[in-house]
């Protein structure tokens, strides 16, 4: 009987080996692009746009390895300055649907850009791949140094991200 219990315990331990599934946080990072439109529906050429690359740790903190404005004007340096953020993510294990919230702050040249998405993070996790990643929400610029404060809506989209 003792041998059966030991074999059962070993089988349960081996069942967990190599079968770990990536978390929503581990695959949500990657390369994302964003378009920020001023309120009132102005054309995209009058809004801000950027490309960024980040990872998301288990607590939801974003760690940026790249951030670059495409059309920053006088408001921000090309690299954005100080960039920080957080994502709160959940995954429906049955469907692979990833949802959640995001905040992102860019501070530079005496101005602060804040992106807020209380429930606009969406994507699909299939195995080790996140696809159709989007974040939508609102943005606000404050400070007024070299640019006019304002706000509007934004949309971020991810490149398909695969994690081993």
Image (tube, helix red, strand yellow):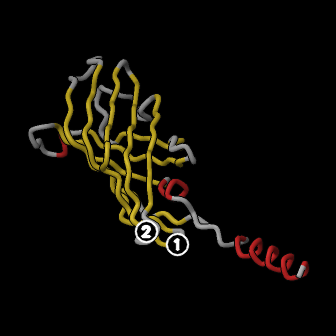
Q: Is residue 103 above or below residue 113?
A: below
Which residue, given by chain and number where applicable, does mark 1 sit on?
127
In this rendering, position of residue 63 left or right of residue 121: right
Question: Compared with residue 28, is residue 39 higher up or lower down, i.e. above or below?
Answer: above
**At 47% from the left edge and 34% from the top edge, which residue is drawn?**
84
- Relative placement, left or right, of 23 versus 107 is right
> In which quarter of the view is residue 106 placed?
top left
From where the camera sits, is residue 64 visible? no
Q: Secondary structure at mark 2?
A: loop
In depth, the one of 99 and 111 nearer the eye is 99
Where residue 107 sits: x, y (%)? 40, 26
Label 1 residue SS:
loop
Quadrant in which residue 97 is drawn: bottom left
Q: Quadrant of residue 47?
A: top left
**Quarter of the image containing the N terminus?**
bottom right
Pointers 1 and 2 in contact (C-beta within 8 Å): no
Residue positioned 33% across, 32% down in the render: 114
- Count of picture labels: 2
Reading the image, the residue beneath label 2 is 96
User: Any mark on residue 142, and which?
Assistant: none
Q: Nearer the viewer, residue 101 or 142?
A: 101
First in sequence, mark 1 or 2: give its number.
2
């Amino acid at each position: 009987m003792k041998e059966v219990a030991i074999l059962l315990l070993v089988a349960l331990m081996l069942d967990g080996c190599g079968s770990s599934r990536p978390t929503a946080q581990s695959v949500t990072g990657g390369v994302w692009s964003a378009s920020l439109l001023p309120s009132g529906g102005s054309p995209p050429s009058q809004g801000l746009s950027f490309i960024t690359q980040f990872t998301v740790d288990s607590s939801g903190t974003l760690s940026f390895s790249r951030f670059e404005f495409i059309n920053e004007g006088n408001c921000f340096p090309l690299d954005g300055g100080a960039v920080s953020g957080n994502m709160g993510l959940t995954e429906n294990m049955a469907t692979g649907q990833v949802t959640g919230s995001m905040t992102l702050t860019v501070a530079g040249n005496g101005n602060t850009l804040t992106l807020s998405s209380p429930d606009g993070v969406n994507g699909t996790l299939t195995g080790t791949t996140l696809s159709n990643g989007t974040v939508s929400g609102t943005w606000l610029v404050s400070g007024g140094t070299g640019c006019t404060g304002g706000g509007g809506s934004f949309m971020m989209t991810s490149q398909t991200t695969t994690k081993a």
